[in-house]
Amino acid sequence: MKCRAVFILIALLLFALFSFQLTLASPEQSKVLLVRIEGTITTATSNLMREALEYATANGYSALLVTMDTTGGLLSATFEIVDTIERSQIPVIVYIYPSGSKGWSAGTFIILASHVAAMAPHTLIGSCQPVSYSPFGNSEPIQDEKTINALAAYLAERARMHGRNETVARLFVTHNLNLNDELALRYGVLDVVASGIDELLAKLDGRVVRVLDRDIVLNTKDAVVHKYEPSLRVMLLNVISDPIIASLAFLIGLYALIFGISAPGHLAEIIGAFLLILGLVGLGFNINIAALLFLVLGAILMIAEAYTPGFGILGGSGFLFIIVGSLLLIPLGSAQWLASEDFYQIFFSAIISSALVIGGFTLFMVYKVVKAKRQKPLLKDIINEIVYVVDELGPDKYGFVKYSGEYWMAKSQETIKPGSKAIVVGKEGHVLIVKRLEEE
């Protein structure tokens, strides 16, 4: 028995020693944090990047891998993302992925600012020349030299920081150049082409990248890849920061506020104020002053229609003002957005069609409210009229009676059964006072 115990003890000691030596011989497996960017670049995107990078840095990840598919977006958010990358303490790998994806406009700024620029086969980057879209005509590239030169110099400097082709970087802005993965690699604006994440990490293993003021050797082969899940705050911001959703929330909130003030008591004013605030947050408070004046004046005119005797002139004018304000609300210039022509067309169509439909519905509702307010009161005319009892009435029982197809709240000093006829003898507010009709 003692020999058996000694044998088990020796076996356990040998196993522990072997495990310890195996741990010393095998270096800790590196970790890479994966975050996905797709759709329009907004404030939510910059918040997502900052959150993911802070998480990766705090939890010992060797690199942040950003997979991207975008047609462009908000310029201020793009600058924030670039600043986040340049202040990062760990390498940031930006990868246009999967095959068929795009890194246009704002996406090109982000990939050229990254420590490692990668693309999957059959992907595209470029189209960085800002576009001005007029609601009364076609979109046109911005030709303002000040704007073009500033953006071209900014992008070229990002390329120079990472040893990439500055000339091509300028052409992305000045000539709206587009490159696929093969040409981007050939012209020196790309570091690697890979079909998938595993292939990309294998190709990057051992590469030296400059992060802040130090060189870092990437240890990415067979690295464990963890996907970052955004916080609830970022997910909410992602929904309301979408330019179409934010603009629709603003317009619906404005119309709901108009209806709520015109006809209080339906919570429309509370819902309207809530949507207005959400829309303002989503738009980043970057509302054109002229658009805001048109919208406010239009709202005042539509509210005034509900309280002023007239023939709809005020309401119609207010509706027109709100439509004009909606047109001005769209970011048409280059100072705020780097987006493709297709994005502007979709955005414009969605906002204008929604403004027309919602505005027309609101104008109709305000008209109905005004019509109801201007109607001659019926309570005086209903005295001595015969009504049909729907619910049992009594000294302590209120119920409904029917008159001319309408239901009225009523009460009686005597018990009246449903289905009986009654005659209106008075009223208390909007409650009718009835008595049983004696059949002859």
Image: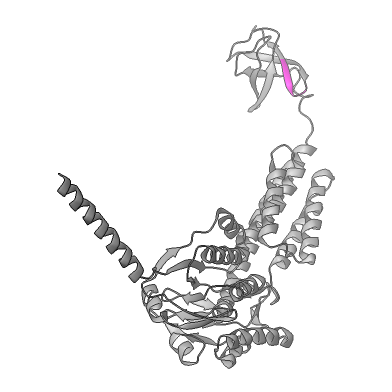
The answer to whether residue 172 is seen in the rendering is no
Q: Quadrant of the C terminus?
A: top right
- Give residue 197's position: percent from left, percent from top: 39, 73
Q: Residue 170 appears at what percent x and percent y?
A: 61, 89
Where in the figure is residue 121, as x and y percent of width and height? Answer: 40, 81
Q: Which one is in front, 128 or 204?
A: 204
Horizontal relation, residue 350 to residue 28: left or right: right
Quadrant in which the N terminus is drawn: top left
Relative to 288, is 408 on the left or the right? left
Q: Which residues are magenta?
A: 429-433
Quadrant for residue 249, please give it.
Answer: bottom right
Which residue does the image show at 65% across and 63% down from the upper left?
A: 352
Q: Is residue 15 magenta?
A: no
> Between residues 21 and 262, which one lies in front from this camera angle?
21
- Which residue is more in the foreground, 16 or 45? 16
- Report how many numbered discs are placed on residues in the image: 0
How was this image coloured?
A: one colour
| Residue drawn at the location 79% of the way across and 65% of the way down | 289
Q: Is residue 417 above or below residue 255?
A: above
